[in-house]
Image (cartoon, rainbow, N blue to C red):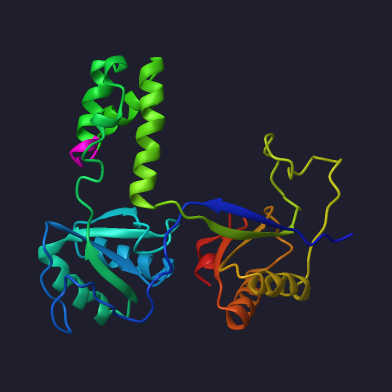
Amino acid sequence: MRRQGICCRVSLPGSARATGTFIFSQSFKGQGWGPVTGEKVLLICNSTTDMLRADRIMRLRGISFKPVPVPGELGSVCATALEISAAEAALIGELLRASKVGVATIAPAPQSPLTELLDKLNQRHLSFRFREVMEKVQAGETLDRDDIIALLRVDNAGDVEALFTAGDLMRKKVVGETVDVRACLEFSNYCRKNCLYCGLRRDNGKLMRYRMDAEEILAVAQKVHQAGIKTLILQSGEDPFYSAADICSVLEDIKSLTGMRITLSIGERTREEYRA
């Protein structure tokens, strides 16, 4: 018995991604790479593949950068931007263009996103250490390992309440009040692994197993696309029944027919298989 299941994943994104090979923010002058005010800018690529290629190219060249969430007004919160030096933006842009990396936009990085954070928290009930970390957040500084551990260990009721408040304020500032709906298509629930926490584990004899063939997967993908969903998660247990060629063929068919973004979640495969 086969099952065709679609579920939705909700996150907090932003507006649609800009299209085209190079689209410059208004901070860039003329038709080429120009100066941007501020010390940092965000490099936003056309796709995750382009972003990973840009990541690799800059690492190999020793260029300093930091992966950060894409602001809501510039793209999907599910995407990752690369924060780079404004002084190096022109050089990096030309380097990526020469390497045929698709860049959607380069825009100023948001500065001090929560400038009035402490004013919005109930400071009377904050511990000294928590207040120190919140001051760094308000100033737009990067938290170090000790700061993050301090936040994870909060147990004071006032700190806990303030932590959730600060997180919600950051979410609203960075991605806004928008919702990104994704479809998850679990095309197989067979798995060769036996992870005790997972319902798909190999030794779960109570689970009715199924596999979908390429035709069934494509039919569901088309229904998802018709529903207006732009991202499809293809998911399964770690099932060697599907070869790398099988998976590649399905991905190519879905891309050519729908143009949807695809996230693949099929467990451990060799590096060569994923490169295919």
Residue found at x 57% / y 58%: 181
Q: Is residue 204 left or right of residue 41?
A: right
Residue 159 falls in which quadrant of the image? top left
Q: Is residue 155 visible in this depiction of the protein? A: no
- Coordinates of residue 4 in the picture (x, y in percent): 79, 62
Q: Is residue 230 left or right of residue 174?
A: right
- Coordinates of residue 49 in the picture (x, y in percent): 42, 69
Secondary structure mostly taken by the magenta-highlighted segment of the chain: loop
- Coordinates of residue 54 in the picture (x, y in percent): 31, 67
Q: Which residues are magenta?
A: 137-142
**Quarter holding the N terminus?**
bottom right
- Coordinates of residue 160 in the picture (x, y in percent): 40, 22
Q: Is residue 139 magenta?
A: yes
Residue found farthest to the right? 1
Residue found at x 16% / y 77%: 33
Q: Is residue 155 magenta?
A: no
In depth, the one of 276 and 126 nearer the eye is 126
Residue 156 falls in which quadrant of the image? top left
